Image (spheres, grey):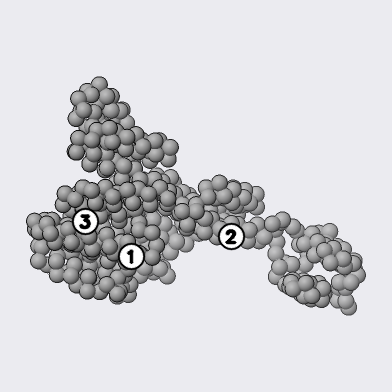
Amino acid sequence: MEIMSIGEKIKTLRKKIGVRQDQLTDDLITRSLISMIESGKRNLNKKTATIIANKLNVYYENMGEEITADYLLETEEIQASNIIDSNIEELYVIIKDRKKFQEQRLNAVLKIAKELALEWELPNKTAEINFFEAEYDYEFEKYSRAIMNYFSALEYRVGCREHDFVAEIYIKLSRCYYELGQLQEAIKYNYKASNIALEHNTNNAKKIEIKSLVNNIIYYTKTNMLDMSLLSIVKIKKTAGVPQDSLFRVALYEANAYRELKNYEKAQKIYNKLLCKEDKLKPELFAYVHLELSKLFTCTCETEKALQSCNDALTACEKMEEDEPADLLFEIAKQYFEIDKYEIALSVLAKAQKNAEDTSRFKDLCDILVYRAEVHKKRGEFQKSELDLLKAEKIVCKHNIMLDLYKLYASYSELYFEMGNFTKCKAYLEKIRKH
């Protein structure tokens, strides 16, 4: 879309329909005024813009179009801003469909938006573009780069005292640090989010409070601080306005915590309560409840029940209207391995791998390949194990998934040790040391 000055816009619209300057005049507007506006020697006000728009619409309405005074009054900066808004909207559409993701198209649209924001000196739009880039990086598991882009977006929002937006970015930063395994930073930014929302009574304060509490539960569970996790669960249950879906997910975390504390009876009661609400649970969460219940039965050495619950999780997963998520399939496969159902596990892993490939979830794909390599190694299938590790290494290097490199090198060294190839084992141990 071409960006034009107000005068150029009127001139273009007039010439498009073959109208002379004097045909836009009336008692209040002379041809001389039209000429000066078109040449940029006079400014256009709302009253004059309305008259010119009405004159143009005599012709444009017959073409099924309408010219408004607001459109005529749009400055070049506003036009640039509108184009950027349209570009950003398209960018979110592009990353929404992972299967049809077009990186070349994304880069082209992103380039136009960045250049316009720079050319017309629009710092607010630059911040919006930075935020999109961070969301894109997070979605595609590039967490370190996402952090940099969130901070770039944050700088402008802090300067403008947009505290609701700042709190939201802190929540996003917290999740990035969690994914990178930096739990102290994750907890720090989680608290910063809730504190700034509370301190400034932001419009999204309740939403931020709920997100922060849910994050606390996840973080404390990850660090095995189950008492703190349960305290956060009690707190969120007492918080008004928590969406039902969030309460269901919190109930699952609660059951998992009690299972880890070996209070199997209480954990099972919560799992069963959730399963009775199948019509209210999202399909993915329903599948996870079956999966976590299967883990409980593994803990209590009830193998048949563990298998049945794992089968139920897979069935629930397969009934999803959308494709089964790779991470859920991966977790189900791991549980099948736990209960020694290797062939089923490998079959589910293959489905998880295909889903990860189709949706460009490269970190999930690496995790799947490295895990399957471990399974092959345990079964003495060393060549298959090495092949999976080689595939994972290519993906890690191509997509710069540095977080997984250490795990990958460790798997290589263990494999070559098992194979008796101590030279290669030592080489990968040295790589771990250097990195």
Q: Nearer the viewer, mark 3 or mark 1?
A: 1
The label nearer to you, 2 versus 1, is: 1
Q: Check contact, mark 2 vs mark 1: CB within 8 A.
A: no
Residue type, numbered disc 1: Lys
Looking at the picture, how far across and down is residue 205, in whole percent? 37, 68
- Residue drawn at (27%, 42%), measured in percent from left and top? 372
Left or right: 66, with 245 as reference point: right
45 in relation to 186, above or below = below
**Marks 3 and 2: CB-CB under 8 Å?**
no
Percent from the top left, x then y, of residue 3? 71, 56
> Mark 3 and 1 residues: CB-CB less than 8 Å, in contact?
no
Which residue corresponds to the image point at 70% horizontal and 61% vertical from the top-left? 75
Judged from the image, the secondary structure of the residue bearing numbered disc 2 is helix
Q: Residues within 10 Å of mark 1 (few under 14, many from 20)?
A: few
Mark found first going from the N terminus, 2 or 1: 2
For the residues labelled 3 and 1, the Cα–Cα distance comes to: 29 Å
Secondary structure of the residue carrying tag 3 is helix
**Residue at (47, 62) in percent of width and height:** 162
Give whichever of 186, 309 is nearer the camera. Answer: 309
Residue 274 is situated, as x and y percent measured from the top left of the image, at 22, 70
Amino acid under label 2? Asp
Residue at the spot of label 1 = 319
Image quadrant assignment for residue 1 = bottom right
Which part of the image, by quadrant, shows the C terminus?
Answer: top left
> Is residue 155 visible to us here?
no
Instruction: Point out residue 353 in the picture as x, y percentages from the top left corner.
Output: 35, 48
Label 2 to label 1: alpha-carbon separation: 37 Å
Point out the tag, 3 or 2, that comes first from the N-terminus: 2
Q: In the rendered structure, find residue 221 and report the number of the disc placed on it.
A: 3
Q: Where is mark 2, residue-wise?
A: 85
